[in-house]
Image (spheres, rainbow, N blue to C red):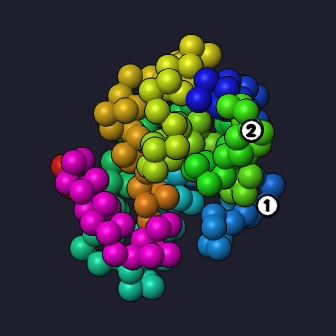
Amino acid sequence: ERDAARLLAQLHAVPRPSFGYERDTLIGPLDQPNPRTDAWVPFFRDQRLLLMARAAWEEGRLPLSLYKRIERLADMLGTYLSEPPYPSLLHGDLWTGNVLVKNDRIAGFVDPAIYHGHPEIELAFTTMFGTFGNVFFDAYEEILPLEPGFHEVRRDIYNLYPTLVHVRLFGGSYVATVERTLVKLGL
């Protein structure tokens, strides 16, 4: 985990010119639009949270009531999220199945859903399926400290995006996860 933290912190420490990417990518089999944007919060709101929630609702996977609550959250994102110092290159789909390990060292990160964004969304995603634990976060924060409130609130907000991806792909229990997150946020 320390090796992974070092490698990701190095990746995240390189400033990029804008949020988004030079082309659209995929998250699993789903389209992931990446228009270049000057600010993180509008990019996350429009190109991740609302886009995926709207698609899940239109496909009949997400109830309208949950979609409307996500819209309310989107209107309030500025109270929870802040702009990072600069856009960072993100793997974008970092879970255990996309981390190659050999002899207790990272051999590679595969199957990316690349874009430039806030490193916190990547770090949040690693908690969704337990990819990395406290050793990883302690080592990462020795290099790139996190602002207070990540583990308490922002992690859950950022994990709505991959959860909505899973709602679109699998439905079921992932809808309940969206519900629990919104309740936790008071929505």
Q: Which residue is mark 1?
A: 23
Up the image or down, 79 lies above or below 163; here it is above
* Magenta part, dominant SS: helix
Determine which quarter of the picture holds residue 100. top right
Q: Which residues are magenta?
A: 165-185
Q: Inspect this view and state whether residue 69 appears.
A: no
Q: Please state the horizontal and vertical placement of residue 172, each as a whole percent of the image.
A: 34, 75
Residue at 74%, 52% (x, y): give it: 110
Q: Please state the horizontal and vertical placement of residue 122, each as a whole percent of the image.
A: 57, 42
- The residue furthest right is 22
Q: Inspect this view and state whether residue 94 appears.
A: yes
Q: Is residue 182 highlighted in magenta?
A: yes
Residue at 20%, 54% (x, y): give it: 183
Q: The C terminus appears in which quarter of the rendering?
A: bottom left
The label shown at residue 102 is: 2
Q: Nearer the viewer, residue 99 or 179?
A: 99
Residue at 32%, 54% (x, y): give it: 73
Label 2: which secondary element: strand
Mark 1 burial class by Cα count in 10 Å: few <14, some 14-19, many 20+: few
Determine which quarter of the picture holds residue 119. top right
Judge left or right: residue 22 versus residue 148: right
Judge left or right: residue 80 versus residue 5: left
- Check if mark 2's residue and mark 1's residue have beta carbons within 8 Å: no
Q: Please state the horizontal and vertical placement of residue 2, each as a whole percent of the image.
A: 61, 23
Residue at 57%, 50% (x, y): give it: 95
Q: Amino acid at mark 2?
A: Lys
Q: Upstream in the sequence, badge 2 or badge 1?
A: 1
Label 1: which secondary element: loop
Q: Nearer the viewer, residue 135 or 116?
A: 135
